[in-house]
Image (cartoon, rainbow, N blue to C red):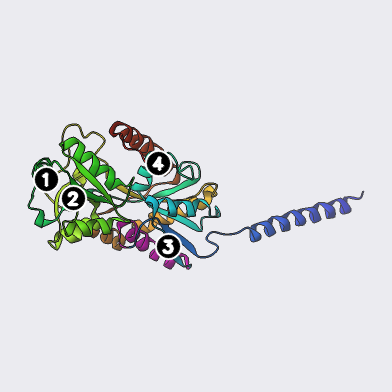
């Protein structure tokens, strides 16, 4: 074979390889490849819904694609999570979940999915102290007075939450157990509905994240007696912390985060995570969430996966200690 012919063949082969590589690159689906769906496993108006809508609006503006918020409440968040689990793992369907998702994952032994395998983390979005609220008409003005009120009623008092296995359910049940009074759980479809009945004194107390509790407290329609951590002082200076001895493990603020179906490529997860972090760092977004009683907080997908695994293990032990199961 002549040198010129050999050089020609090598050049032709290089062109074929380069062309094939270009075709693969050009034909590979980019992310996002169309509308993105933020699935919120809660009713409209709650903190998860508000945070999802704020972030969705900015991502849509930045990426030039629709980001639709789809509320799929029910079964303590299982309906929404199941929808995302069954979706294509391409990053176009995202679960925006509250810490109640982690509680349910820990306590419900009959979930139709494995939350640590069938879903993959994208990143944190925010944290919020949970506030213990009562109606002003109840006539109690402190944690001690609420405990005394409960003890004076052997038939029990009632508390509301966003449903069986929600963070509010766990907080309120633990409060009654540690403070030593009988309490009956009244589950609702979402936190807004539970808080509405607290305002009307149909149920006597509830734990609610800042976005649900603080605006109503500022309007005088709710009274805040305490919060789950000292971080609440940023949003309501001087608020008491629910830290009675024996409540180790109680100091756990609500968190909100994004997940996608298991098997979603890591580059997709990382790109969405970075965009969410960018949005959360915007001054107007930070102010919006802070006004509601939530603090923007982001993480990498790997950090979120590790956090969720640890959270599920911690809540499962707490549930076992308190004999709370959802079987």
The disc at residue 108 is 4
- Quick check: 188 above or below 116? below
Q: Name the residue under label 3.
A: 70
Residue 47 drawn in magenta: yes
Q: Residues within 10 Å of mark 4 (few under 14, many from 20)?
A: some
CA gap, disc 2 and disc 1? 9 Å
Mark 2 or 3: in front is 2
The disc at residue 146 is 1
Magenta stretch: give its range. 45-64
Q: Upstream in the sequence, badge 4 or badge 2?
A: 4
What residue appears at the point 16 percent right and 48 percent down from the top-left corner? 233
The answer to whether residue 282 is seen in the rendering is: no
Q: Left or right? Give the position of 13 relative to 157.
A: right
Residue 228 drawn in magenta: no
The part of the image, by quadrant, that contains residue 320 is top left
Mark 1 or 3: in front is 1
> Where residue 54 appears, x then y in whole percent?
35, 63
């Amino acid at each position: 074979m002549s040198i010129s012919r050999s050089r020609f063949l090598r050049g032709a082969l290089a062109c074929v390889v380069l062309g094939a590589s270009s075709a693969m690159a050009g034909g590979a689906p980019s992310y996002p490849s169309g509308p993105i769906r933020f699935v919120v496993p809660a009713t409209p108006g709650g903190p998860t819904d508000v945070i999802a809508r704020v972030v969705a609006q900015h991502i849509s503006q930045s990426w030039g694609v629709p980001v639709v918020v789809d509320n799929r409440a029910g079964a303590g968040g299982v309906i929404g999570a199941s929808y995302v689990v069954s979706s294509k793992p391409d990053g176009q369907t995202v679960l925006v979940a509250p810490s109640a998702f982690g509680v349910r994952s820990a306590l419900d032994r009959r979930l139709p999915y494995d939350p640590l395998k069938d879903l993959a983390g994208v990143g944190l979005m925010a944290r919020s102290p949970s506030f213990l609220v009562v109606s002003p008409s109840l006539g109690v003005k402190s944690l001690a007075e609420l405990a005394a009120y409960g003890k004076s009623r052997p038939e029990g008092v009632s508390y509301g939450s966003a449903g069986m296995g929600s963070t509010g359910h766990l907080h309120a049940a633990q409060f009654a157990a540690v403070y030593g009074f009988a309490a009956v759980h009244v589950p609702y479809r979402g936190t807004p509905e539970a808080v509405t009945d607290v305002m009307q004194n149909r149920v006597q107390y509830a734990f609610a994240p800042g976005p649900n509790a603080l605006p109503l407290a500022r309007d005088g329609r709710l009274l805040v007696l305490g919060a789950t951590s000292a971080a609440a002082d940023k949003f309501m200076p001087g608020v008491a912390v629910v830290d009675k001895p024996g409540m180790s493990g109680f100091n756990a603020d609500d968190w909100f985060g994004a997940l996608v179906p298991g098997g979603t490529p890591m580059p997709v997860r990382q790109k969405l995570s970075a965009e969410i972090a960018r949005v959360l760092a915007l001054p107007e977004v930070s102010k919006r969430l802070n006004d509601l009683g939530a603090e923007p907080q982001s993480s990498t997908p790997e950090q979120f996966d590790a956090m969720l695994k640890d959270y599920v293990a911690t809540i499962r032990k707490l549930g076992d200690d308190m004999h709370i199961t959802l079987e």
